[in-house]
Each structure stands twice: as structure tokens, then as C-alpha cells.
Image: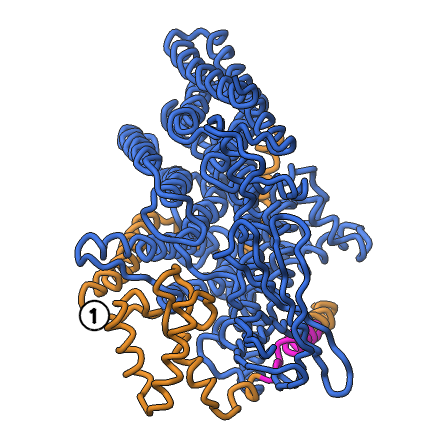
Chain colours: A blue, B orange
């Protein structure tokens, strides 16, 4: 008997039984109004997490101990792999990835059952049953369709090792964040469905969902950003986002989730958009399940997808149950979803938030259509037509520019409504600055209309956000806080608001980087013998000759390096070492070693495309302007997101006369 | 009011400085980039960027390392040397491998469904969005006196939210 495989399989089976118990206990407890039974179900969710953790630890120990008697370990790891990379082996194939997904979900749900469910007595039974149902859905897939705990028929002396594309340190963090972000969409979904089932569609569920939704949005955002960074630094095609079907599947749930973290403010403040908010959390989770189905069904081809299997059909069934169940509940509860207040003016922050939501919806629909189009083309005209980046860039690009501009406009507009004079006053300075910036950029040579629009939208967003900080700081200073401490006082007063503003600044910085690196990217391909040079972007680059070195770990057999001396004038700027890596167990799958020289101005990005017996090598060289700002903007976005997620810690008084100009208190709506 | 003016001037000046700094970083010789002459390698590259690998997904021909892509790149250079135009070369590869090698989906035939979807999706969002906005605004309250709702409104709402959280 294989101890590891048996222990893992038994843990999963026990977890499945426990999750089923949680559903049953919560359902009976809810119907018979016996809180003890509901409490038992809640504790069962936590116990299920314990058993799934035990299964995950079993697989981890198997990987660390090179236990090739477990078929999964033999297929993803090998003896000479570095210990940290075995963490990447854990989720590198379908069964392990599904286990990681279920494990992350179970831990989040255990935390949810421990901290949140006791605070929502109005829906404890429903929330517990839904947690149990989500866990059950994924545990069935693990136990019956894709278990990582099958024993090897013949125990091999060594394992196959990690897929060469995944042999990168970035794989230690990118998939955990992305998968964690996708599974975390389950919590806002559970709370939304709980509100529907319990008929509590007032602000009660929003108070509980806020931090879960922001956490989910933040983790998923980080996962997507890390995905872009990994693609840029490892895949070797000069870009960071290729609109691959699986990349699309990862960003799709983020769109309704981002819309939700904005539109929930409208329900909190104005009691509006109740139906819409529920639709968004259901859409986010449904799209996460769709992504799971998409990646695992073989429906679309992708460098990221797992092998085709029957598990795809299973997840399609899960998706159908989620959508039909949600639709039935929403129709049932429509009478509960009347808005508590009316929308007062088109020129208000509410209106821009609503239009903003529509844009997110339009973008999601376009991306979904492009992702599924190859399936439909194969179905109707027997030809799998690829929808490449030009389609997305031409359709989604302008929508994103409008989105950034709308964020800027929304930041300037007040809540509810304001007089024309107030609006004109608020728009004056940012408008003039943006106009001046537009003229200056045009004179400098930024003439491509879309690039100009994108950069100006970003500049406007930074200006209006800076204005918000300046106004807040002025108010805090008037309340007696020293100037240097005003910004921290603002965050202490309302992390969510000012964290959100930081996120917007991050978005603006990223937008400029995207424009710079796509519209103004330079590319050339050169074939050089040792000692030969070429010039690009003011640099002279000299090939120093091929160098071969033996591999050391992680299945690398050999590395061929083609060093390049980069000079700017007479000054040496860098020595780049692009090359190619061959793997012992994957001779047909060599990978590129991307060489990067990064500065605030641009990235010099080089990879080798081949060489001949004379030592002449072919280089693909890119100059990507401003790309480092994509990562800097991403960092600002994440820091802002953390502030927005953090609990509110209190308020710092702001003297009313300074911020109001003597304005009257609005009537309570 | 008079004390406000220097502050506003300071804000405008600081903003202008910020824009100038941003422009300094952004000024990556925008104009100079497009000026270089087109070499045969560049001409081939322009065509390669319009084609995808027939084996991989969404991977452009110019950056793909498969043998088939290396052969296609050689074929492009040969055909360019023979004097064929970009469109002729692209049509040749489309005839050989089908539409899946085209980076840009041509707006014709069944592909019109994709563009139609985009149009319908955006139109639906606009129509439904407008309907909802108008419906939400139907019973709007009369316009309030000019200038009475400014930052105090937001502050008041924030405080309400804090109080609700505290409860």
C-alpha cells in the first residue's frame, strides 16, 4: 500500500463527507430553526479545511521526499530539482492545480466560517450551506476526476521534472496569487447568494462583503500583474499581455469584481443598484468557474492550458447550476430590490460610477466574445479562427481610455448633485493643466490620437487625484495637524477613500506605460558574428561570441549564452546575457533566456532566436519605452488596494468651515 | 479669499511642475523613433508581425521559435527578394494554413459575427444603461441652491458611513 497516496485520497474523501455534512446540517438547522445544528455545519466547514490541508501537506511531503510511488509527484518533479521549485511542481499540472485551488478555497472559507458567519445570524444557515456546496463541487472534481493521489504503476527511479516553461522563480508566486484570487471570488458570491436566499437585500450583506470583495479584487489584480511580469520576463516575445484565451479567463472575473468594489459604494451610500451588485458578484464567480472550465476542458488552445479531460464537462455543469440557481433566486427576490433613493443628477459621482460599471461590462462582454469566438467558428465554419491581439487592442483599448477619463471626471464630481458653478470651479484647474499638457505633448511629437488620448486621460486622473489629496491635506492642516503629517492623517481618517485614490494613480501610471510600450515599441532583428555591432535607440550593441555552460539544477541540460556589450556613447551601459536553455527530459522544448536592461526611460529586451555552426547568432531586440512604470504603477495600485482593504481605524477631525465654504448640511436621504 | 489666491497659484505651479516632470520622463524622442529607413529585415519583420504561428496560440511569427515559424520567416525573405508585395505574401500563408495564421481577424464572412457581437454588446450596454439612468432619475428632487453641496456633502456621507461601520 502506498502510504502517501492512501493518506491523501482518504483526506480528500473525508473532506468531501465533511463538506456534505456542512450542507445537510446547515440546511436542516435553517429550516428547523436550530442554531446548534447550523453551528455544527459551520464547524464542519472548518474541519473540511483541515482535511484538505492534510491532503495538501501529504502531496507537499511527497514532493519534498521524491516519493515517486505517487504518480503525480513522478510526473512533475525530479530528484535534482531545487526545493523551492517543488512548490511550483505542486500546482504545475491539473490535479495539483485543482488541489491548490480547493485548498485555498477551503482556507478562505474556514476563515469566513470562523469570523464572518457568526456576525450574520440572519443568514448563517444559508452561508454555511453555500460554503459546503462550493467545497463539495471542487472536492467531487478532485476525488472522482483529477486526484493527485494515484499510485504509480511502476515506481520510476527519477521523476520527469517540471515543465520547462515553469522553471522560473516567478512561478513560486504568480499561480498562487492568480488561483487564490480566482477562488476568493467565491466569498462575495456566497454572501450575495446568502442575501438573496435570506431576503436581506438591504445594506446588511454589503457590510460583510466589503472587505472580502476588496481582498478578492486585490489578490486577483496581483495575480494578473504577476502574470504579465512572468510573461514579459520569461516567455520571450517582448510583451506582457498577449490576449491569450487563458489570460483572458484570468482577467474576466476581475472586471465585474472591480465594477462591484465601486458600485457597492452606491448601495452603501444611496441604497441603489441592489440587483446590479448581486449580478456583479455572481458574474465574478461564474467567470472564475468559466475560467476553470476553459483551462481544463481543451475548449481553447493556449500555452497555459492543461490537457483536455472530462473534467471540463463537469465544470460546465457546475457553471450551469451556479447561473441557473442565481437567476431563479434573483427573479424570486426582485420585489426586495427596489432602490431606496433616486438618482439625482447626471453630473454626479453616482452617474460616473454607473457609467464606469457599464464600461466594465462592455469590456467583459467583448473579451468573452473574443475568447469564445474560435469555438463558435469551429462549430459553424469548421475553422478555428484565432482572435489575436490586434482585435482586442483596437476594441478594448479605446474603452479603457474612456474608462480612465471617466475615473478622472468622477473624481472631480461630487456625490448626489451640485450647481453648475461648483462643477465649473472643480473642473477649471485640472482641465487647464490637461489642456496645456496636451499641447506640450503634441508639440513634442506625441501625435498618434489614441496614444495622446490615453496619456492625457492618465494625466487628468493624476491631477484630479492630487487635487483631492491637496484639499484633504489643507483641511487636516486647518484642524491643527502639521503639514508633514497631513497625508498620513488623511489615510488614518479614511483608508478606503484615499487608498482608492492611490489605486487610481497606479492605474494612470500603468496607462502611460501601456501607451509607451505598445505604441512606441521599437523592434529589430539582427544576425551577428562575434565582434559585430548594431545600433538601436542611441546604443551600440556588440556581440561577444557564444558561450555554452552545463546545466545545474531543475532539469536544465545546457545553457547557450550569447553575451552582448551595450554601450551608450563611450560608456558601457550593460552586458546582457540572452540565450537558450535545453532540458534533459524535454529536448523538444527549449526555452528562451530573456536578457533585460531596465531604466526609468526604457527597457532593452533581447532574446536569441538561433545560431549556426560558425557562431553567428540571430537576435530579436526590443526597446520598450516606459515599461518599468507598468510595474511601478502596479506597486502603487497594490499599496492603495491594501489601504482600501484595511479596517477603518477612526477619524481625524477636519474643520468644516474649510472644506465646506459655509455649505449647509444635506438632508438625510 | 485673498489668502486663497497664493495657495491656488502654488497648486497650479506645483501641478505644472508635476506635468513637466511627467513629460520629461515621457519624452522618449517620440518623433525620432519612426524616422529610420526600412531595411529588408525590417520589411520581413513587418510581415511577420501580421502573422501568427500555425502551431502555437496567439504567438506572433516574429517571436516564435518553432521550426515551422523559422521556415516561414525564410520563405518571407525569399518572396520579398522575388518582389512580392506584403499582401501577396500574407495571402500565400493564409491559403496554406487558413485564417488562423492571421494576427488580425479580417472583417468579412463568419468573422462579422465577432464584430457584430462587439457592436451588439456595446449597443446593449448603452441602451440598457441609458434606460436605467433615466429610470433612476425619474423622480429626482428639485435642484438645490447653487454652491450648497460641496465637500461637506462628501464629508457628511463619509461620517455616516463610519458611524454605520462602528455600529
Depicted A411 relative to depicted A610: above or below: above
Please indicate, yes or no, whether residue A269 appears anywhere in the rendered image. no
Left or right, A582 with respect to A545, comes to left
Residue A313 appears in which quarter of the rendering?
A: top left
Report the number of numbered marks. 1
Residue at numbered disc 1: B108
- Residue A52, position in %: x, y? 53, 24
Instruction: Please tell me which residue lies in front, A318 or B69.
Output: B69
Depicted A482 relative to depicted A108: above or below: below
- Residue B100, position in %: x, y? 30, 64
Left or right, A348 with respect to B13, comes to left
Q: Residue at x 30, y 33 (%)?
A: A317
Which residues fall within the magenta stretch? Answer: B12-29
Instruction: Please tell me which residue lies in front, A432 or A647.
Output: A647
Please indicate, yes or no, whether residue A171 appears anywhere in the rendered image. yes
Left or right, B107 with respect to B11, comes to left
Amino acid at each position: 500500500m502506498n502510504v502517501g497516496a492512501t493518506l491523501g485520497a482518504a483526506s480528500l474523501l473525508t473532506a468531501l463527507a465533511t463538506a456534505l455534512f456542512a450542507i445537510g446540517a446547515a440546511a436542516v438547522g435553517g429550516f428547523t430553526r436550530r442554531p446548534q445544528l447550523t453551528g455544527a455545519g459551520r464547524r464542519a466547514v472548518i474541519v473540511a479545511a483541515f482535511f484538505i490541508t492534510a491532503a495538501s501537506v501529504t502531496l507537499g511531503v511527497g514532493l519534498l521526499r521524491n516519493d515517486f510511488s505517487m504518480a503525480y509527484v513522478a510526473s512533475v518533479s525530479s530528484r535534482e530539482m531545487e526545493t523551492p521549485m517543488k512548490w511550483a511542481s505542486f500546482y504545475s499540472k491539473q490535479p495539483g492545480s485543482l488541489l491548490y485551488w480547493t485548498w485555498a478555497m477551503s482556507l478562505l472559507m474556514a476563515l469566513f466560517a470562523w469570523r464572518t458567519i457568526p456576525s450574520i445570524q440572519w443568514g448563517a444557515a444559508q452561508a454555511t450551506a453555500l460554503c459546503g456546496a462550493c467545497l463539495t463541487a471542487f472536492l467531487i472534481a478532485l476525488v472522482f476526476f483529477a486526484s493527485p493521489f494515484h499510485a504509480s504503476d511502476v515506481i520510476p527511479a527519477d521523476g520527469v521534472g517540471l515543465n520547462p516553461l515553469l522553471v522560473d522563480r516567478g512561478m513560486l508566486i504568480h499561480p498562487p496569487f492568480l488561483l487564490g484570487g480566482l477562488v476568493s471570488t467565491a466569498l462575495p458570491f456566497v454572501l450575495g447568494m446568502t442575501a438573496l436566499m435570506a431576503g436581506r437585500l438591504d445594506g446588511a450583506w454589503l457590510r460583510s462583503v466589503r472587505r472580502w470583495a476588496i481582498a478578492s479584487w486585490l489578490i486577483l489584480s496581483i495575480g494578473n500583474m504577476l502574470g504579465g511580469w512572468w510573461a514579459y520576463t520569461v516567455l520571450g516575445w517582448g510583451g506582457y499581455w498577449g490576449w491569450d484565451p487563458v489570460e483572458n479567463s484570468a482577467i474576466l472575473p476581475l472586471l465585474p469584481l472591480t465594477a462591484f468594489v465601486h458600485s457597492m459604494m452606491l448601495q452603501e451610500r444611496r441604497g441603489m443598484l441592489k440587483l446590479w451588485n448581486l449580478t456583479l458578484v455572481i458574474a465574478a464567480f461564474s467567470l472564475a468557474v468559466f475560467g476553470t472550465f476553459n483551462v481544463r476542458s481543451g475548449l481553447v488552445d493556449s500555452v497555459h492550458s492543461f490537457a483536455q479531460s472530462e473534467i471540463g464537462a463537469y465544470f460546465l455543469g457546475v457553471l450551469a447550476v451556479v447561473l441557473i440557481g442565481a437567476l431563479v433566486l434573483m427573479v424570486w427576490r426582485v420585489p426586495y430590490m427596489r432602490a431606496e433613493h433616486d438618482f439625482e443628477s447626471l453630473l454626479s459621482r453616482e452617474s460616473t460610477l454607473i457609467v464606469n460599471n457599464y464600461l466594465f461590462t462592455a469590456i467583459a462582454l467583448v473579451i468573452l466574445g473574443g475568447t469564445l469566438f474560435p469555438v463558435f467558428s469551429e462549430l459553424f465554419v469548421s475553422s478555428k479562427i484565432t482572435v489575436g491581439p490586434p482585435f482586442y487592442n483596437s476594441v478594448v483599448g479605446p474603452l479603457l481610455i474612456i474608462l480612465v477619463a471617466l475615473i478622472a471626471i468622477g473624481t472631480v464630481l461630487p456625490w448626489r448633485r451640485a450647481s453648475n458653478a461648483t462643477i465649473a470651479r472643480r473642473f477649471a484647474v485640472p482641465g487647464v493643466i490637461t489642456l496645456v499638457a496636451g499641447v506640450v505633448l503634441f508639440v513634442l511629437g506625441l501625435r498618434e490620437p489614441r496614444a495622446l488620448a490615453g496619456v492625457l486621460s492618465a494625466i487628468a486622473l493624476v491631477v484630479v487625484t492630487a487635487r483631492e489629496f491637496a484639499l484633504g491635506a489643507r483641511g487636516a492642516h486647518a484642524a491643527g495637524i502639521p503639514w508633514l503629517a497631513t497625508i498620513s492623517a488623511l489615510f488614518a481618517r479614511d483608508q478606503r477613500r484615499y487608498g482608492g485614490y492611490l489605486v487610481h494613480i497606479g492605474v494612470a501610471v500603468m496607462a502611460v506605460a501601456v501607451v509607451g510600450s505598445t505604441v512606441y515599441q521599437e523592434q529589430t532583428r539582427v544576425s551577428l558574428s562575434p565582434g559585430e555591432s548594431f545600433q538601436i535607440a542611441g546604443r551600440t550593441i556588440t556581440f561577444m561570441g557564444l558561450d555554452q555552460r552545463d546545466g545545474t539544477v531543475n532539469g536544465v541540460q545546457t545553457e547557450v549564452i550569447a553575451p552582448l556589450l551595450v554601450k551608450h556613447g563611450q560608456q558601457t551601459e550593460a552586458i546582457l546575457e540572452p540565450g537558450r536553455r535545453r532540458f534533459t527530459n524535454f529536448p523538444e522544448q527549449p526555452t528562451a533566456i530573456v536578457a533585460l536592461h531596465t531604466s526609468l526611460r526604457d527597457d532593452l529586451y533581447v532574446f536569441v532566436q538561433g545560431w549556426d555552426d560558425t557562431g553567428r547568432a540571430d537576435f530579436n531586440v526590443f526597446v520598450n519605452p516606459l515599461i518599468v512604470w507598468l510595474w511601478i504603477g502596479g506597486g502603487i495600485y497594490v499599496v492603495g488596494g491594501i489601504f482600501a482593504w484595511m479596517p477603518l481605524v477612526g477619524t481625524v477631525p477636519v474643520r468644516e468651515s474649510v472644506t465646506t465654504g459655509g455649505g449647509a448640511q444635506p438632508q438625510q436621504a | 479669499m485673498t489668502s486663497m489666491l497664493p495657495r491656488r497659484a502654488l497648486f497650479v505651479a506645483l501641478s505644472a511642475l508635476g506635468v513637466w516632470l511627467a513629460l520629461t520622463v515621457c519624452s522618449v524622442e517620440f518623433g525620432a523613433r519612426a524616422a529610420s529607413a526600412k531595411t529588408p529585415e525590417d520589411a520581413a519583420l513587418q510581415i511577420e508581425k501580421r502573422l501568427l504561428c500555425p502551431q502555437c496560440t496567439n504567438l506572433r511569427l516574429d517571436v516564435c521559435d518553432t521550426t515551422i515559424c523559422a521556415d516561414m520567416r525564410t520563405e518571407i525573405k525569399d518572396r520579398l527578394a522575388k518582389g512580392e508585395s506584403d499582401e501577396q505574401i500574407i495571402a500565400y500563408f493564409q491559403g496554406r494554413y487558413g485564417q488562423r495564421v492571421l494576427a488580425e481577424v479580417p472583417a468579412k464572412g463568419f468573422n462579422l459575427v465577432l464584430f457584430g457581437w462587439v457592436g451588439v454588446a456595446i449597443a446593449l450596454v448603452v441602451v440598457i444603461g441609458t434606460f436605467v439612468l433615466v429610470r433612476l432619475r425619474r423622480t429626482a428632487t428639485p435642484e438645490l441652491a447653487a454652491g450648497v453641496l460641496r465637500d461637506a456633502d462628501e464629508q457628511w456621507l463619509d461620517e455616516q458611513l463610519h458611524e454605520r461601520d462602528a455600529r
